[in-house]
Image (spheres, rainbow, N blue to C red):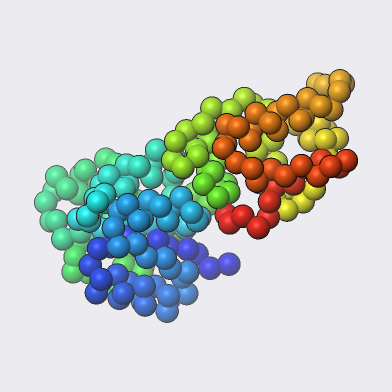
Amino acid sequence: MKKRILVAEDDEEIRTILYQFLTAAGYDVSVAKDGLEGIEMFHQSRFSLLLIDIMMPKIDGFTMVEMVRKESKVPIILLTALEGEEEQIKGFDLQADDYVLKPFSMRVLLKRIENVIRKSSYEEDRLRYNNITVNLKSMQVWVDGSEVTLTSKEYEMLVYFIKHKGQVVTREDILDRIWKYDYYGDGRVVDTHVKNLRKKLMTDSIITIRGRGYRLDETAQI
């Protein structure tokens, strides 16, 4: 599967060059013309790396990094014409993975991208479904970038649904998987948890299959 890169860059010429070069290098590339569009695209798809220009309108690169880091460890490389030491230190303080000064060599940038992706274990740590992000290590959940508090059972159900997207799961499946041997009562406890999960996540993508169980809508984008 191709690695996906999001390029957030307000300079159209640089944005086009990056798109063409990275696409030719075998990456699946999405481009955003400013920080606000970049954040919106980040919430719509799953990326292997973000390439972010610092000086952008609406939301600058530093702010975009700060917003992303509240919910994700996705690798980030900052692009900038700012040569000052303080700017570079700020980028690293915000937990950017690398910092590239303009003008830059496209061949060197490609090697930096390969290096950062290779070192990252990010893709193993996160699940994404539509506007919902799940950090599997910290067990945190975000909807549209805002953290949502779930009970342990609700969290386990969400992960189970996402991993079985498009499949019908019965109440018995869920009880066996999540409650294990801790519950011997009525299976309607699952219905209650699903109802609460839909409300907290503000989604109707958990579909009730009458007489069988539930299915997470597979037509929705991840």
| Residue 45 image point, x, y percent | 50, 56
- Residue 23 placement: quadrant: bottom left
x 13%, y 48%: residue: 85
Quarter of the image with the C terminus in it: bottom right
Of 209 and 53, the residue lying toward us: 209
**Residue 127 versus residue 37 in the image, above or below:** above
* Residue 8, quarter of picture: bottom left
Residue 18, position in %: x, y?
32, 72
**Residue 177 coordinates in the image, percent (x, y):** 78, 35
Q: Who is closer to the viewer here, 138 or 155?
A: 155
Horizontally, residue 115 falls left or right of residue 107, namely right
Let me know if residue 76 appears in the view: no
- Residue 107 relative to residue 197: left or right: left
Left or right: 19 with respect to 47?
A: left
Could you tell me which residue is drawn at 37 percent across and 65 percent down? 31
Residue in the picture at 58% in, 28% down: 150
Q: Please, is residue 11 above or below residue 65 in the view?
A: below
Q: Can residue 127 be seen in the rendering of this structure? A: yes
Name the residue at 36% across, 55% down.
Answer: 38
Question: Where residue 178 appears, x then y in whole percent?
Answer: 75, 31
Which quarter shows the N terminus?
bottom right
Q: How many marks?
A: 0
